[in-house]
Image (cartoon, helix red, strand yellow):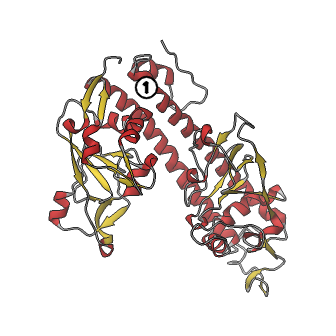
């Protein structure tokens, strides 16, 4: 695939702005493509998560059709400008945000939508975008910038081969994510059942509270807890780790900044380039609990899937006794714990969660019989291990995909060779032959 041709982006697509909506229109009505959905997805999701009340005229003007490309048109940083998301089907009745630009193809045989989804997020194109963007108080994308952008593309036939291959890889990643989401929901439900409703299995295997287990009022917690349970605070079972390091230390460890911790999700699967790890660096270990300390209300709480490094904007927590780890992870993930951390944070414009005289004082109740924690771990340990396995597999798949695009485009490998070498997509340890 070394026969590449240059096209003017504006000759192949027509740019349109999104709807200027009012707050009262949001949250009800028809499907709506938002800035965050575009930013976080290479492809428009099967089902749009947002709604907007729009007229029939607006649905027609701001429609979403197969082959449309959506770009984020404004951002605080250049790196977040022009992030793309491609529609691979029509979305009847849907509309899109005014913080986006829609690019609708004006041709049928130059660009292939599935290929464009990966090409536009590649380093090759992102560098071009950043070089042409306007940066004042905010980065912005307009018609003038669009007219400067070039597309350097292989033949349409080659785009189809590469696009379909990469789309299959993305589907595998999506399947892994859905498995993790379902397992996480199960684990959170189990935690709630055992440690919030207190219906953990009693000595006879029956739900404790529902089966008449004795509950006593605890004056310190101001609520009833199972007889024999203790009133504690986080400081009794957790401690903070501040293993500071230099940027040259541990060169083989991945760098996980706070923006790579997802909200309301116990697992992560993306890192930043190690060259970005420059200051205020700390080291964490596999199975540490990672809490996004900056703007803690964003609810970033994850289980470390492997050893790594971060910055002090992430709070690293470790249990005094390993048996408490899973209990602490799910307790920290509760909305009440995040709200407590936010209320007790420091700073006005950018609040930071603090441990001493802050989150460490959060009140909890713990069982006197550690067998309850052992049994909880027996169920949740396999779930957390599955998070690690599938998250690492997704990392590998993403790395392979990002590495392959320039290799395929300059002809060092062919799609056939890649498919042959991949075998089962996502198998760890695979290598890729190059010419």
- State the residue at coordinates (81%, 80%): 227
Q: Please tell me whether residue 128 is drawn above or below residue 297 in the rendered image.
A: above
Q: Is residue 391 left or right of residue 363?
A: left
Q: Please tell me whether residue 268 is drawn above or below residue 192 in the rendered image.
A: above
In the picture as drawn, the residue positioned furthest to the top comes out as 435
- Quarter of the image with the N terminus in it: top left
Q: Is residue 20 left or right of residue 389?
A: left
Percent from the top left, x then y, of residue 247? Answer: 70, 40
In this orientation, does residue 364 appear?
no
Q: Depth check: 137 or 358 in front?
A: 137
In this orientation, does residue 373 appear?
yes
In the picture as drawn, the residue positioned furthest to the left comes out as 57
Percent from the top left, x then y, of residue 46? Answer: 35, 51
Q: Quadrant of residue 377?
A: bottom right
SS at circle 1: helix
- State the residue at coordinates (37%, 54%): 74
- Within 10 Å of disc 1 (Cα), the crowding (few <14, some 14-19, many 20+) is some
- State the residue at coordinates (30%, 27%): 153
- State the residue at coordinates (29%, 37%): 149
Percent from the top left, x then y, of residue 134? Answer: 36, 48
Q: Depth check: 8 or 3 in front?
A: 8
Q: Please tell me whether residue 210 is drawn above or below residue 423 in the rendered image.
A: below
Q: Depth check: 232 or 277 in front?
A: 277
Q: Quadrant of residue 354?
A: bottom right
- The residue identified by callout 1 is 406
Q: Depth check: 156 or 418 in front?
A: 156
Q: Is residue 130 left or right of residue 5?
A: right
In the picture as drawn, the residue positioned furthest to the front comes out as 136
């Amino acid at each position: 695939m070394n026969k590449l041709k240059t096209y003017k982006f504006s000759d192949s697509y027509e740019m349109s702005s999104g709807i200027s909506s009012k707050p009262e229109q949001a949250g009800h009505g028809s499907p709506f493509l938002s800035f965050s959905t575009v930013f976080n997805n290479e492809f428009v999701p099967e089902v749009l998560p947002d709604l907007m009340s729009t007229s029939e005229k607006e649905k027609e003007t701001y429609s979403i059709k197969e082959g449309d490309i959506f770009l984020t048109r404004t951002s605080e940083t250049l790196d977040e400008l022009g992030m793309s998301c491609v529609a691979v089907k029509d979305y009847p009745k849907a509309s899109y945000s005014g913080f986006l630009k829609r690019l609708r193809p004006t041709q049928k045989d130059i660009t292939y939508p599935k290929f464009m989804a990966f090409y536009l997020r590649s380093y090759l194109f992102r560098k071009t975008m950043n070089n042409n963007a306007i940066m004042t108080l905010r980065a912005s994308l307009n018609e003038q910038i669009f007219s400067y952008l070039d597309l350097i593309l292989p033949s349409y036939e080659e785009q189809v081969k590469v696009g379909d291959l990469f789309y299959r890889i993305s589907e595998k990643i999506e399947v892994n994510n859905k498995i993790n989401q379902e397992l996480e929901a199960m684990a959170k439900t189990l935690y709630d059942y055992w440690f919030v409703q207190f219906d953990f299995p009693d000595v006879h295997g029956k739900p404790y509270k529902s089966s008449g287990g004795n509950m006593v009022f605890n004056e310190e917690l101001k609520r009833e807890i199972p007889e024999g349970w203790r009133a504690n605070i986080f400081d009794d079972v957790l401690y903070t780790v501040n293993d500071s390091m230099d940027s040259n230390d541990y060169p083989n460890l991945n760098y996980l900044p706070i923006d790579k911790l997802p909200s309301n999700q116990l697992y992560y699967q993306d890192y930043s380039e190690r060259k970005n790890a420059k200051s205020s660096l700390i080291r964490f270990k596999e199975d540490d609990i990672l809490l996004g300390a900056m703007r803690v209300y964003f609810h970033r709480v994850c289980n470390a899937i492997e050893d790594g490094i971060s910055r002090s904007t992430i709070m690293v927590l470790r249990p005094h006794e390993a048996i408490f780890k899973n209990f602490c992870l799910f307790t920290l993930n509760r909305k009440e714990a995040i709200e407590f951390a936010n209320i007790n944070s420091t700073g006005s414009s950018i609040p930071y969660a603090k441990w001493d005289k802050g989150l460490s004082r959060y009140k909890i109740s713990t069982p006197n019989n550690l067998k309850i924690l052992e049994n909880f771990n027996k169920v949740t340990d396999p779930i957390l291990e599955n998070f690690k396995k599938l998250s690492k597999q997704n990392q590998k798949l993403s790395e392979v995909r990002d590495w392959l695009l320039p290799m395929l485009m300059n002809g060092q490998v062919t799609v056939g060779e890649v498919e042959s070498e991949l075998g089962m997509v996502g198998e760890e340890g695979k290598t890729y032959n190059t010419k």
